[in-house]
Image (spheres, helix red, strand yellow):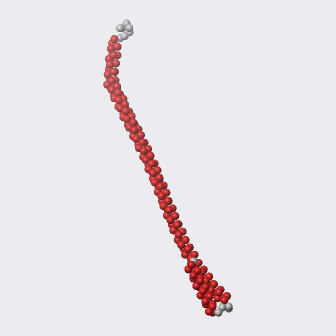
Amino acid sequence: MEGLGIDTKLLIAQAINFALFFFVFRKFLAKPFMKFLDEEKAGQLEQEKAFSKAKKLEEESSKKEEAILTKGKKDAQEIITDAKESAEKLKEEILAQARTEAEEIKKKAKKQLDIEKEEVYADAKDKVTKLSFIIVQDALKDVLSDDLKKKITERILKNSSRRSSIS
């Protein structure tokens, strides 16, 4: 092999050096490096699992939050609807009560008006009777005697009392 330019002693020495380098490299560098890479890979897998789990939790919490918001909006809408219905019922009750009270006030006012009308009518009738009596007395004072005046007055009063009982 020397003809080819290969030195066997050098080749054996290089083979031994390569074997020693391979053994040292594998024992002290490759194994710890592979162990480090495996640990990094496992850590990365754990991070991915944790990220996936966190993503699932986030999605679940988003769904729960959305469900809560939807339920809250629905509840709020129901409360608003109930409040509107209650307000409408209360409004109707108040209007009905106001109408009833207005009718009662009208009836009382009409009764009061009728009573006052009757009082005014009776008062006017009494004053007309007295005025008539005074007019007749003044007009006939010189012409009639006292007895005749009394008879006419009695007849007027009698007729006026009959007319008032007829009315």
Instruction: Determine whether, in the image, residue 64 is placed left or right of residue 138.
Output: left
14 or 155: nearer the viewer: 155
Residue 78, given in percent of the width and then of the height, sits at: 45, 51
Asked where in the image residue 56 lies, by quadrant, the reply is top left
- Which one is in front, 129 or 8? 129
Give the residue drawn at x 34%, y 25%. 30
Locate residue 143 relative to residue 166 in the image: left or right.
right
Which is nearer the eye, 167 or 25?
167
- Is residue 36 among what the camera can see? no
Q: From the viewer's perspective, is 123 left or right of 26?
A: right
Residue 156 vs 19, above or below: the answer is below
Measured along the vertical axis of the image, is residue 98 above or below residue 37?
Answer: below
Residue drawn at (51%, 68%), measured in percent from left and top? Answer: 104
Q: Is residue 166 visible?
A: yes
Residue at 38% across, 37% down: 53
Front residue of this view, candidates 126 and 139 = 139
- In the image, is residue 19 above or below residue 43? above
- Left-right relation of 133 to 86: right
> For the C terminus, which image quadrant?
bottom right
Report x, y in % for residue 125. 60, 80
Does 100 appear above or below 69?
Answer: below
Q: Residue at x 45, y 48 (%)?
A: 74
Badge count = 0
Q: Quadrant of residue 127?
A: bottom right
Give x and y (percent) for residue 144.
66, 91
User: Where is residue 60 shown, x and y percent of the image?
Assistant: 40, 41
Quarter of the image where the N terminus is located: top left
